[in-house]
Amino acid sequence: FIVPVLAGSIVRSAVLDVNLSGMELTQTMAELLHRAGHDLSLTPATDGDRPIPPVTVARNVKELGIEVFPTSLEAHLGTSPYMARSVLNRSDAPVKDVYVGSRKFSLGWERFLCAETIFLDDGSAGIDHGPIHRAVLAAIDATVRAVDEGEVEDVGSRDKALRDELLKRVVLSGGSAAIAGLPERLGYELDRLVRQPAAASSPSA
């Protein structure tokens, strides 16, 4: 959820649902690892009769290696992130090695492609109001409206001033909040979004 809090109270009319679970990111990572040619079959040396399920291996790889690219991956690569096969075949990926047990996984663009779904403006992330940066801004603008309409306590700031204050106070929590690069990319996307004329005028709309 995106939960705006003002003067110590939740602004309930501005709460938005973020229907994106860690398991969905794990499944995305599993598919990307498979497309990239990684072998997800793994049997621990201490218990040779019980292989580790591939989805568990993918989850561990995700938790160790997933990272958010600092800017739009599509703009950087010059191609849609949906063209996964062509992206994964590129030789210019910044490689990161992670280990699950003794198995080494050399991760290229797949570690960035997995997290990019959070920022894709196509509804695939399952977030109200689009990708996470648009949803955060929508919740902030709904909070500003709630103050203007007297729904919540007046905190001394209104309209653009209040919006600017709230943009500086975005806090991430939960397991996926630990994804490397997520706070920086969210800040980057929010900055780009508020500079757009339509977004910049919304608090007083």
Image (cartoon, rainbow, N blue to C red):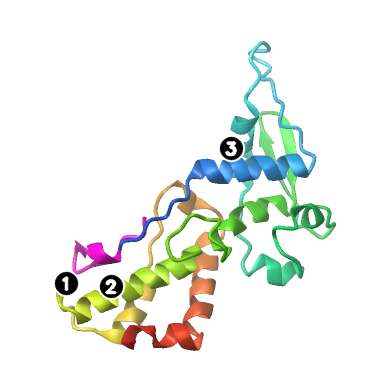
Relative image position of residue 13 (x, y in whole percent): 25, 65
Please report the residue visible at 23 percent of the width from the left and 84 percent of the height from the top. 157
In the image, residue 9 lies in the stretch drawn in magenta = yes
Say which amino acid is labelled 2.
Thr
Relative image position of residue 32 (x, y in whole percent): 70, 45
Neighbourhood count class around disc 2 (C-alpha, 10 Å): few under 14, some 14–19, many 20 upward:
many
Q: Secondary structure at mark 2?
A: helix
Asked if 66 appears above or below 194 in the picture, the reply is above
In the image, residue 23 lies in the stretch drawn in magenta = no
Neighbourhood count class around disc 1 (C-alpha, 10 Å): few under 14, some 14–19, many 20 upward:
some
Q: Nearer the viewer, mark 3 or mark 1?
A: 1
Q: Secondary structure at mark 3?
A: helix
Say which amino acid is labelled 3.
Arg
Relative image position of residue 80 (x, y in whole percent): 72, 64
Say which label, 3 or 1, has the lower sequence index: 3
Q: Which residue is mark 2?
A: 143
Please report the residue visible at 64 percent of the width from the left and 44 percent of the height from the top. 29
Frontmost residue, 28 versus 166 = 28
Neighbourhood count class around disc 3 (C-alpha, 10 Å): few under 14, some 14–19, many 20 upward:
many
Specify whether residue 134 is in view: yes
Say which amino acid is labelled 1.
Val
**Which segment did they paint magenta?**
1-14
Say which label, 2 or 3, has the lower sequence index: 3
Q: Which residue is mark 1?
A: 152
In screen coordinates, is 83 left or right of 13?
right
